[in-house]
Image (tube, rainbow, N blue to C red):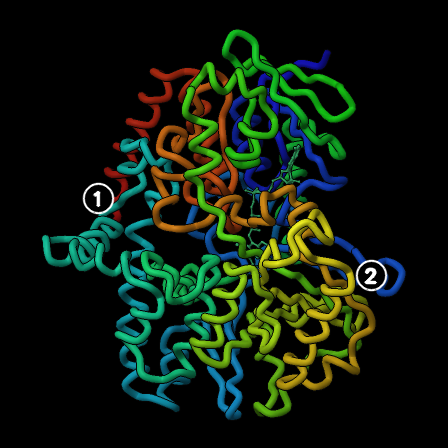
Amino acid sequence: MERYDVVMIGAGHNGLVCAAYLLKAGYSVLLLEKRPVPGGAATTEEVLPEDAPGFKFNLCAIDHEFIHLGPVVEELELTKYGLEYLFCDPVVFCPHPDGRYFLGHRSLEQTCAEIAQFSPRDAQKYAEFTDYWLRTIRAMSPMFNAPPRSLLDIAGNFNPSKLKDLVSVVGGTNKAMDFVRTMLSSAEDLLNEWFDSEILKAPLARLAAEMGVPPSQKNLGIGTIMMALRHEPGMARPKGGTGALTQALVNLVQAKGGTILTDQPVKQVLIDNGRAVGVAVANGTEYRATKGVISNIDAQRLFLHLMDAADVQDADPNLRDRLERRIVNNNETILKMDLAMSEPLRFVHHNHRDEYLIGSVLIADSVRHVEIAHADPMLGRVPDADPSLYVVQPTMLDPTMAPDGMHTVWIEFFAPYQIAGLEGTGHNGTGWTDELKHKVGDRIIDKLAEYAPNVKTATIARRVESPAELGERLGALKGNYYHIDMTLEQMVFFRPLPEIANYKTPIDGLFLTGAGTHPGGSISGMPGRNCARVFLQTQHPLTHRWQDASASIKSALKSLRNP
Ligand SMILES: Cc1cc2nc3c(=O)[nH]c(=O)nc-3n(C[C@H](O)[C@H](O)[C@H](O)COP(=O)(O)OP(=O)(O)OC[C@H]3O[C@@H](n4cnc5c(N)ncnc54)[C@H](O)[C@@H]3O)c2cc1C
């Protein structure tokens, strides 16, 4: 039987990041991945080899912001392993039905100048609003880059300028209370408080709804941070597609002696005397872990599907029930479309310029349009009467992703996992069928064609993946690409539940990482890095605490010398 220090369940980008840190610390690591390729929701694949050979598609994630708020790329020296980030500028184009448009640049000043064309007041307010969120982001990033309960780690991530930002946002009772109030608000409330023009509010609402909820959802005003991130640290894509990030991580893991086995769905975590000692995969092969098993899949799947109920019960009699009933998963997921194109989209009603296609194109006609797009899925309805979309033409920034002169289009359409009234029918009982997904796909193309009519004539081939298929590919419950919802009560030290929020579990030697842990979904690598830190601390608690304390002191002294 093969033995490793650590066995990881899943090789998503967080699993790979975690493995890379452990390998660098001298541990032997095996990653077991259920799919034929590693990367999870961070892959680039040639999925239309017959109809569109040579076209590479990002099947899930495309725009990377959060990874630039942490040290993963630099610490793991990913550029040495082949990663090159291309930053987008402009970052957002949102055509309005009346012929005007919102064009967001990486530069705040340029963006304000665009906004001033339709509202000088909103331009001024946008500068203030963005400044507030940028200070908040800088003040919060030390927390993102540390396990939520490791106060020493969090403290070590602060420097005087981040402390200044923190004080500017929450210093003093009134500011602190107002910050809490902002957090308890909805994106829609905040946008109405700050701005007048629908043409600005609609794209900001659309980006806020990337949290996976409608803009009216209370407690998620933080969603309006999303546009600020595109100014700083900026929005980038790996050259060659999101899969190039995964490939760099794979190169690093392999160079450090790690093993990645694909087509290996883990079926069971092996427990001996209350301790995780390995896993068994679908074909019955067992792999032993002498120091720990780390799960890149969320706690619900891990404890409810891959473990004997009695083992979980022995460790914590309440855990199964709490996982089953307390964790929230609101039924919203994505219907994903990919197009191979003979020419770029052309926004003929909006004075087309190719630069519109560098960042993301948002089809969001109004805040109400976005509201319906995200409220309907929660009720089990497909919002395809008038689809709101997130569209990207990655080949405008990175022509290497398609044959010469050709293009791809990436379309994200939020949709229910379970369609109301169709329970028990279609794919995995969700109500989704091939016929339905293509019908919805046609509505999506009709809507996009209202803005870029050539989408119909320039499409060479298309792929439509229903929510049910996406969920099956990722192995995610109800197709939840954040593993569990990104709502306030499931964030930071509540993610996924307080008793398992610091990457450790009540089972000795069993750890959690991935989007279902702090700080959550998206391409950040932070859950992977944070989990590795906790794992290493459990191996040599005293040495590690001492190293962390001296690193914190050194970083504080350094920043005092060079503020
Ligand atoms: C359509 C779509 C678009 C997105 N767009 C963006 C974007 O533009 N920007 C952004 O930042 N984020 C985006 N996201 C979210 C982001 O991609 C994910 O939150 C992130 O990739 C999660 O990474 P992870 O490593 O934590 O988990 P995952 O990527 O889910 O990795 C988990 C891995 O475990 C494997 N696995 C599952 N079960 C088993 C098992 N039993 N045995 C072995 N292996 C198993 C899976 O195959 C997978 O490889 C998008 C997601 C989707 C679906």
Query: Which of label 2 and label 1 is nearer to you?
Result: 2
Q: In the image, residue 510 lies at what x, y percent?
A: 51, 22
In the visual, does 96 lie left or right of 137?
Answer: right
**Between 533 and 415, which is closer to the camera in this rendering?**
415
- Tell me if I can see residue 243 in this picture: no
- Element type at marker 1? helix
How dense is the environment of label 1, judged by Cα within 10 Å: few (below 14), some, or many (20 and up)? few
Q: In the image, residue 291 lies at what x, y percent?
A: 54, 15
Look at the picture and state if 548 lies above or below 519: above
- Element type at marker 2? loop
In the visual, does 496 lie left or right of 3?
Answer: left
Q: Residue at x 66, y 74 (%)?
A: 444
The quarter of the rendered structure image containing the N terminus is: top right
Q: Amino acid at mark 1?
A: Leu
Label 2 or label 1, whichever comes before in sequence order: 2
Which residue reaches farthest right?
A: 50
Which residue reaches farthest front?
A: 421
Q: In the image, residue 56 lies at what x, y percent?
A: 75, 59
How dense is the environment of label 2, judged by Cα within 10 Å: few (below 14), some, or many (20 and up)? some
Look at the picture and state if 246 lies above or below 279: below
Look at the picture and state if 230 lies above or below 158: below
Residue position marked by numbered label 1 in the rendering: 560
- Tell me if I can see residue 375 in this picture: yes
Q: In the image, residue 548 lies at what x, y percent?
A: 33, 27
Q: Residue at x 74, y 71 (%)?
A: 407
* Residue 211 lies in quadrant: bottom left
Q: Residue at x 51, y 24 (%)?
A: 25
**Between 292 and 69, which is closer to the camera in this rendering?**
292
Q: Amino acid at mark 2?
A: Gly
Residue position marked by numbered label 2 in the rendering: 54
| Residues at circles 2 and 1 in contact by the CB criterion of under 8 Å | no
